[in-house]
Each structure stands twice: as structure tokens, then as C-alpha cells.
Image (cartoon, helix red, strand yellow):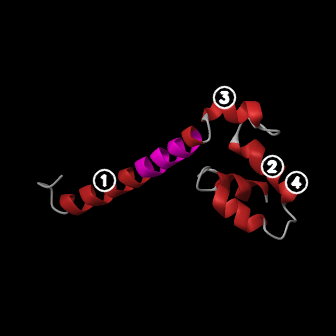
């Protein structure tokens, strides 16, 4: 891309985007592994969902009126990056 006019800029931009997504995925995987892995999480959790959409629906219906709902969602979004868009579809 460096040989194309403006290619260096776009290559850096696209590389940065890919690196950001990759970093988020690595962080999410590390959090899941530190929690014992998916099998352990599902086996020890009182709630298990087949999709982030299912979890978003349950969260809104069960805890949507809680005073700290936004704070909890902000924290959970670091582990579940698709949570915010799924919540937006529920509203």
C-alpha cells in the first residue's frame, strides 16, 4: 500500500483498526480464560444464554430499571463487546 498515493495512511489506518479488534479479542479471551473458561462459567452460572441478544433481553427485562444499570453494562461491555448494540436493539 505504500506505493499507492495515500496508501501508507490507509494502510496504517486499517492496520490500527485490525490491531484494535485483535486486542479486544485477546482481552476478552483472557478474561474468559481467567474466569475458568466457558465450560466452567456455564456450569457455575445461574444464567446461561445462547446469544448476546438473549442476554441483553434478559438484562433489560430483569434489571433495566436498576439505578446502576448503565454502570454494570459499561463494565460488562468490556467482556461482551457486542452487548451495547444488542441492548440498543432491545429498546
Please identify the residue farthest to the bottom as the structure is shown. Answer: 67
Distance, label 4 to label 3, CA atoms, is: 26 Å
| CA distance separating discs 4 and 2 | 6 Å
- Disc 3 or disc 1, which is closer to the eye? 3
- Where is residue 57? Give x, y as percent: 81, 49
- Label 4 with label 2: CB-CB less than 8 Å: yes
**Which of disc 1 and disc 2 is earlier in sequence?**
1
Find the distance from the CA under tag 3 to the CA under tag 1. 33 Å
Q: Residues within 10 Å of mark 3 (few under 14, many from 20)?
A: few
Who's the residue at 48% across and 51% down the image? 24
Q: Where is mark 3, residue-wise? A: 39
Report the Cα–Cα distance between label 4 and label 1. Answer: 39 Å
Q: 81 or 40: nearer the eye? A: 40
Q: In front: 85, or 45?
A: 45
- Kindly identify which numbered label has been placed on residue 57: 2
Q: Secondary structure at mark 1?
A: helix
Residue 15 place in picture, x, y as percent: 30, 53
Give the labeled residue for mark 4. Answer: 61
Give the distance between the C-alpha atoms of the residues marked 2 and 3, in whole angstroms.
Answer: 23 Å
Q: Which residues are magenta?
A: 21-32
For the residue labelled by badge 3, is the local secondary structure a helix, a strand or a loop?
Answer: helix
Q: Earlier in the sequence, mark 4 or mark 1?
A: 1
Number of labelled discs? 4
Rendered image: mark on residue 15: 1
In which quadrant will I find the C terminus?
bottom right
Q: Position of residue 6 (x, y in %)?
A: 19, 63
Q: CA distance from mark 2 to mark 1?
A: 34 Å
Secondary structure of the residue carrying numbered label 2:
helix
Pointer 2 with pointer 1, Cβ within 8 A: no
In the current view of this chain or complex, which residue is farthest to the left? 3
Amino acid at each position: 500500500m505504500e506505493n499507492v498515493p495515500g496508501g501508507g495512511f490507509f494502510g496504517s489506518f486499517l492496520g490500527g483498526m485490525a490491531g484494535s479488534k485483535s486486542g479486544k479479542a485477546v482481552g476478552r479471551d483472557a478474561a474468559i480464560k481467567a474466569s475458568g473458561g466457558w465450560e466452567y462459567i456455564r456450569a457455575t452460572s445461574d444464567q446461561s444464554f445462547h446469544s448476546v441478544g438473549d442476554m441483553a433481553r434478559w438484562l433489560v427485562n430483569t434489571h433495566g430499571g436498576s439505578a446502576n444499570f448503565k454502570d454494570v453494562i459499561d463494565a460488562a461491555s468490556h467482556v461482551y463487546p457486542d452487548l451495547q448494540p444488542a441492548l440498543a436493539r432491545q429498546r
